[in-house]
Image (spheres, rainbow, N blue to C red):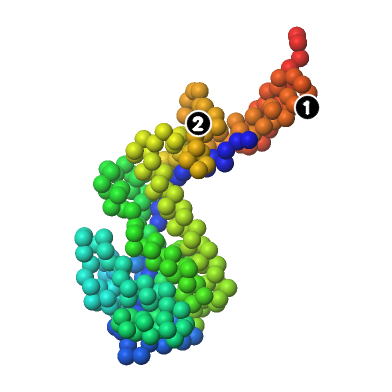
Amino acid sequence: GAADARPRVCLPVAHVVLPCVHPCPSVTMTDKVRCALLSVSDKSNLAELAKALHENGVKILSTGGTAKAMREAGVPVTDVSEYTQSPEVMDGRVKTLHPRVHGGILARPLEADLKQLEEIGGQPIDLVVVNLYPFEATVAKGADYATCVENIDIGGPTMVRAAAKNHQRVSIVVDPTDYASVIASLPSGPTKEARAKLAAKAFGHTAHYDTMIASWLQREVESELLTPLKYGCNPVQIPASISGIGGNPLPFDILNGKPGYINLLDALNAWQLVKEAREALGVPAAASFKHVSPAGAAGYEPL
């Protein structure tokens, strides 16, 4: 049968996280949002979210441009570097990769976890708002290799995955369109069911992000197992490519032109119809598909 060929398309993203500030003498957990970490590339509706958090007594930790945007909106913010007592280094490559950040996110409501978190000077982080560096947009505008590499987000996906894993306690928000529901849920924060849905969305977000990066890098190193496409499902989805499952080559050869993803789906569906028609009728067959729907089929008949 045909391989499960999937388009490899780069899309934009950003990241926001909400953490606590200075370590407290006694670490506890409550049934309300007390600490949030925000670090985002897409700053849509950021000011509204930050103001709502502040008005509900939530301490906000943040980084770089996100912290600057919130301060300009009149919202008090603590820099992650102040919270961790560790400066940003390597031109910002290392900002949030710190035990106080990830311990605060991953801590379970267990006495042992809280004790260890207190020992390292951390505090539970209840809300993480993150959207990732705009990798797709960087590639789409034709940036050079080094610039594209610098737009591969590391800290953002790490926080997203940590918060999503610990969704029993922590809310992870990767989409600005979800800010309104988070604001409406304050001061208690999203329900257990809502946190689970947000976590599922977050894991899909990072999976797609990694797929975009892998597709781009394979193209850059001219992988023989990656076949470039004219575009994905739609002309706006560029660059795009497909590869066989498990690192295997595609089960067919492209003899002419540069097809789009739908062209390949049409060809694969036509092949299945022709194969079944020949088996059923015992004669050569032909088929035509348009947007994955059969437009015509024929069996051989001597003239």
Mark 2 or mark 1, which is nearer the start of the sequence? 2
Question: Where is residue 140 shown, x and y percent of the image?
Answer: 36, 44
**Residue projecting furthest to the front:** 112
Q: Secondary structure at mark 1?
A: helix
Q: Residues within 10 Å of mark 1 (few under 14, many from 20)?
A: few
Q: Nearer the viewer, mark 1 or mark 2?
A: 1
**Left or right, 76 with reference to 240:** left
Quarter of the image with the N terminus in it = top right
Q: Residues within 10 Å of mark 2 (few under 14, many from 20)?
A: some
Which residue corresponds to the image point at 64% horizontal and 29% vertical from the top-left? 271
Badge number at residue 292: none
Name which quarter of the figure residue 72 lies in. Answer: bottom left
Rendered view: 203 above or below 282: below
Q: Report if residue 45 is visible in the image.
A: no
Rendered view: 12 above or below 97: above
Which residue corresponds to the image point at 39% horizontal and 36% vertical from the top-left? 223
Rendered view: 203 above or below 109: above
Q: CA distance from mark 1 to mark 2?
A: 30 Å
Q: Amino acid at mark 1?
A: Ala
Q: For this rendering, which residue is in front, 234 or 214? A: 214
Residue annotated with mark 1: 280
**Left or right, 282 with reference to 33:** right
Which residue corresponds to the image point at 47% horizontal and 82% vertical from the top-left? 109
Q: Secondary structure at mark 2?
A: loop
Badge number at residue 259: 2
Question: Where is residue 45 shown, x and y percent of the image?
Answer: 40, 67
Question: Where is residue 274 shown, x and y percent of the image?
Answer: 69, 27
Q: Report if residue 198 is visible in the image.
A: yes
**Left or right, 84 with reference to 268:** left
Name which quarter of the figure residue 77 lies in. Answer: bottom left
Quarter of the image with the C terminus in it = top right
